Image (spheres, rainbow, N blue to C red):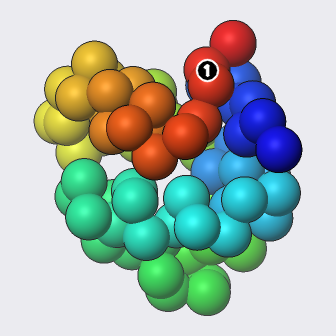
Amino acid sequence: MNKIISLNETVYELCTKYPEIKDILKELGFVDIVNPVMMNTAGRVMTIPKGAEMKNIDIETIKEKLKQNGFEIV
């Protein structure tokens, strides 16, 4: 199965579609992603690029880690 994602999808949508992405993002510095309250509020409007900017995480590092874990970014 191809795991195709768009960086325009919200973190909530991505984690609903591919639950394993939550651990990958947490490892990269999105520590609030495991908090259900944060996921159900901010996660519904937050995209990976917005979160990366807020957390000062290089978006290219995130993309590379996602690719290493079998995700295709479109």
Residue 31, located in which quarter of the rendered image?
Answer: bottom left
Question: Residue at image x 38%, y 38%?
Answer: 68
> Residue 4 location, x and y as percent?
75, 30
> Residue 21 location, x and y as percent?
55, 59
Question: Residue at image x 71%, y 50%?
Answer: 14
**Furthest-front residue in this view:** 1
In terms of depth relative to the viewer, which is nearer, 9 or 38? 9
Q: Residues within 10 Å of mark 1 (few under 14, many from 20)?
A: few
SS assignment at label 1: strand
- Image quadrant for the N terminus? top right
In terms of depth relative to the viewer, which is nearer, 65 or 12? 65
Q: In this rendering, is residue 69 above or below 26?
A: above
Residue 18 appears in the picture as rendered = yes
- Image quadrant for the C terminus? top right
> Residue 13 location, x and y as percent?
79, 52
Residue 42, located in which quarter of the rendered image?
Answer: bottom right
Mark 1 lies on residue: 73
Q: Amino acid at mark 1?
A: Ile
**Furthest-bottom residue in this view:** 36
Q: In this rendering, is residue 43 above or below 32?
A: above
